[in-house]
Each structure stands twice: as structure tokens, then as C-alpha cells.
Amino acid sequence: MARPKKKLYIRTFGCQMNVADSELMAQVLGEEYELTAHAEEADLYLINTCAIRRKAEEKVKSLLGSLKFLKQQRPQLLLGVGGCVAQQEGERLLAAAPHLNLVFGTKGIYHLPELVGRIARGERVVDVGLNRDCPELPRRAWLPGTFQTMVTIMRGCDNFCTFCVVPYVRGREASREPDAIIAEVADFLAAGGQEVTLLGQNVNSYGRGLAETITFTQLLRRLNGLPGLSRLRFATSHPRDLSPELIDAFGELDALCEHLHLPVQSGTDRILKRMNRGYTHEHYLEKVAALRRACPGIALSTDLIVGFPGESEADFVQTLDLMRAAGFDQSFSFKYSPRPQTRAATYPDQVAEEVKAERLARLQALQDELTLKSHARLVGQEHEVLVEGFSKRSIEELCGRLRTNQVVNFSGPRELVGSLTRVVITEAHPHSLKGRRVQGLDHLVSVGRSA
Ligand code: 5AD
Ligand code: SF4
């Protein structure tokens, strides 16, 4: 009889890429460990960390401190810290936390079975080599009922934006072979999957360095042809590398959702230059106009940093102007936070914390207005919705997303979770929409109305 598996608990901080990496950790350890949702019963506890801003890093360190008590109660517990903070801190983490068994960097994931074997034999291990290989893994097994997945198509980043720690902690850019990606997506669809999100730090440069000549748009075209794929999304795109062929793809590929996350970071040419972003306010807005021509109704989201070194009030106002001109449907905004090794951390003209906080509040108030306007435009329209689960307020209500990525709550039977349905938008709220499911005669009436 097979030996019962040991329990693995993973606490994930940070971005979608980290969520995908945590899935990978569970996959590579799958022969010996099975995931648990209860930290108290874990035999192996892994923290997957994020170093993008100082706050994220502080959270990791405070969690690590509090785990001393869990380890006192369960001395046999093995504790590991992986991901970007582990990559950045290496040996220092192990020295600061005597209860820690393992520190593994962003490439160490692939070597976890060997590393965990060593800590189980009593060693304390640090593995933060950035030149480690990332071999293709055996086929993934999806849990029954999984209808959304993320597929990592490339790792690392060669852009060196002056604020960003990613190139230092995730290493040089490397694309996965297209056939491996296509096989993974085809497997997922065969298991009943509906929606795939392709992940990379800068997906537009997908394909560089591969033996086969292939662009990101060509990869999207090949995936779009797979039977059963309802929704295809990707993150993240760099505005400088957003090609005309990719812009056109939004108007052409059935599965490609009408939503693009296109981080602008700032609306001022001088700051964009200091950030090493490689585009201007005007170039960015030209790309937005081209996207809207190719795909009217496309939703746009972005990332913004306030208080980058040297940002004046006039610079900040230009960022607000760009937000209005682009009409972002959603944005993720952050106070600039100096990161180790990055060029901007050495700039002498750092902006005061209070100024950053005040600008962030003004920027977020503007985004709330823009989001509400974009939500209000949807009222009365009928949309396809992928039902993702239950609404935050009540399990009587379903929750899903439009192709354009907005969240909608509506009544319907729970069996709909994981499938596509159609919904008329009835109310616009700041963070979500309310809708009514279209069915039977209702559908005919709604079609009749809009004809
Ligand atoms: N400070 C603040 N925000 C940052 N980001 C990246 N580095 C920093 C930093 N040092 C933001 C950018 C990026 C998002 C993932 O995090 O907006 O697009
Ligand atoms: Fe960081 Fe710039 Fe690379 Fe994005 S493109 S991961 S912001 S260096």
C-alpha cells in the first residue's frame, strides 16, 4: 500500500507569478507531499515571498518571526523561505532565523525535492543560484473542477527599470518552448478548463533566445486555435514592446479577452526617462488609441508609481492627465519604495513620505471616478460571464467576470460555477457590478430590445 503523503502548507505573498510558482512548488513536491489549508498540521511550511516593495518584504519577516512558536509546538516541522526575498537575502535570512531550515531562490523551486531531502536529514540549506536551470516538468495534474489556470511562459526580466528589483531577484529573461506551453494548455482544456492566463514579466519579448523563431502574438494565435479555449489572458505587457501585430490580435482572436494590463508607471516624460521605461506620455497614448481602434470596448488597466525620486507636483499632475486621457478602467497604484541594488534607490532627490501619501490618495480618488464611469457605461448591456464562485456578501449570489475583467454579482444556481453564462448589467458600483442572468424568454426579450 502507498505510504500516506506528508502535509505541505504554502503561504504566498505578491503577484500572480508567485501564485503560479506556489502551484509549481506543490507540483514538484507532489510525490511526497500533499497540500493542506491548515498550517498547524503541516510537516513542511513554505513561504513564497515578494520583494517588489519594502512593505511586502517586512510582512514576510514578521511572519517568519511569528513561526518560531509553531516550530516550538511542532519541532519536527520543516520551514523554508523561497522566492524573491529569499533570493535577495540568502544566507542573511538563515542567520537571522535559527528556526529556519531552508532558503531557496527563484530558481530553487525546480530543485525542491532534493533540497527538502537534505533539510529532512538535518542540514540547514541555502540555494540561491540564479543560473540554475528550469527544466520542463512532467505533465501537470489539475484538480477536478479546475476551470481557470495560469501558465508561466517566461521567467526573468532584462529591462532594468530603475525602480525595480525583479531583474536582480528573478535573473535574465528566458522563454519556455512553445510546444511545452501548448501541450500544457491542451491538457488543461482536455480536463475541462475554460480560461488560461499566460504569465511573464514582459510577455511582449516572448521568444527571444529560443531555437524556433516565434513571437508572442504567434504563440497567442497557436493557442487561440486549440479547441475548447473560451478565454485567453496574459500579464504583463511592457508598453514599449507592444507591437502592432499584438494590438491587431485583440480585434482578431476569438478567445483573447478584450482587456489589457499595460503598466504606465508615470505620465511624465522626464520621470519615464529616469525610470528607463523607453516610451513617452504621447507614445503611450498613441498605443491606447491604436488598441481602441483595433478593439473598440477593450478595457485597460495599469500600474502607477507616485513619488518616484524627483517627481514634482507638475509631473504628478501630468500623470493624472494621462489617466484621464487613457480612461483606465482599473489601476494598481503604489508609493515609490527604494529597493536594494536598484539605480533609483541611489537618486538623491527622494520624495517625502507625506507627499507620496497625499499624491496616492488623490490618484486613487481619480481612479475611483474613472472606474465608476466605466462601470456606469456597462449598465443595460448584456455580457458573457465566466462564473467564478460566490459573491463576497452571500453564498446565495454568484460572482463572475466579464471578458473585460470587471467583477459582476448576480443570482443563479450554484451549478453554474465554472461555466459561461450571459448577464445583463443592472447596477454600477465602485468595485463591482450587479447583474441579472439572461435565460429562456428573458434572453429573447433582451435580444429584441437591443435589436
Ligand atoms: N516601488 C513602488 N512600486 C513598485 N513597483 C515595482 N517596483 C516598485 C517600487 N520600487 C510596482 C510597479 C510594477 C508593479 C508590479 O509594482 O508599478 O508594475
Ligand atoms: Fe520590473 Fe521593468 Fe522588468 Fe517590469 S519590465 S519586471 S517593472 S524591470
Image (cartoon, rainbow, N blue to C red):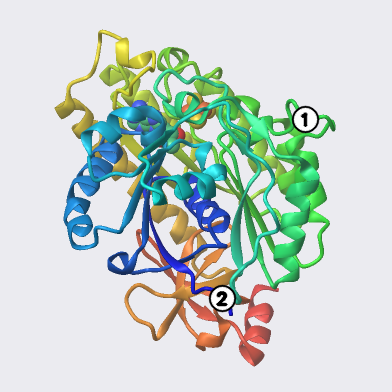
To which residue does mark 2 refer? 423
CA gap between label 2 and label 1 equals 43 Å
The foreground one among 176 and 259 is: 176
87 versus 233 height, above or below = above
* Percent position of residue 210, x then y: 77, 30
Residue at 77% across / 60% down in the picture?
A: 186
Q: Is residue 113 visible?
A: yes
* Percent position of residue 299, x then y: 55, 49
290 versus 260 height, above or below = above
Q: Which amino acid is tagged 2?
A: Val
Q: Which amino acid is tagged 1?
A: Leu
Q: Give the label, 2 or 1, closer to the camera.
A: 1
For label 2, count other residues whose C-alpha is less than 10 Å away and answer few (under 14), some (14-19) or many (20+). many
To which residue does mark 1 refer? 210
Whichever of callouts 2 and 1 sits on the residue coming sooner in the sequence is 1
Q: Residue furthest top?
A: 348
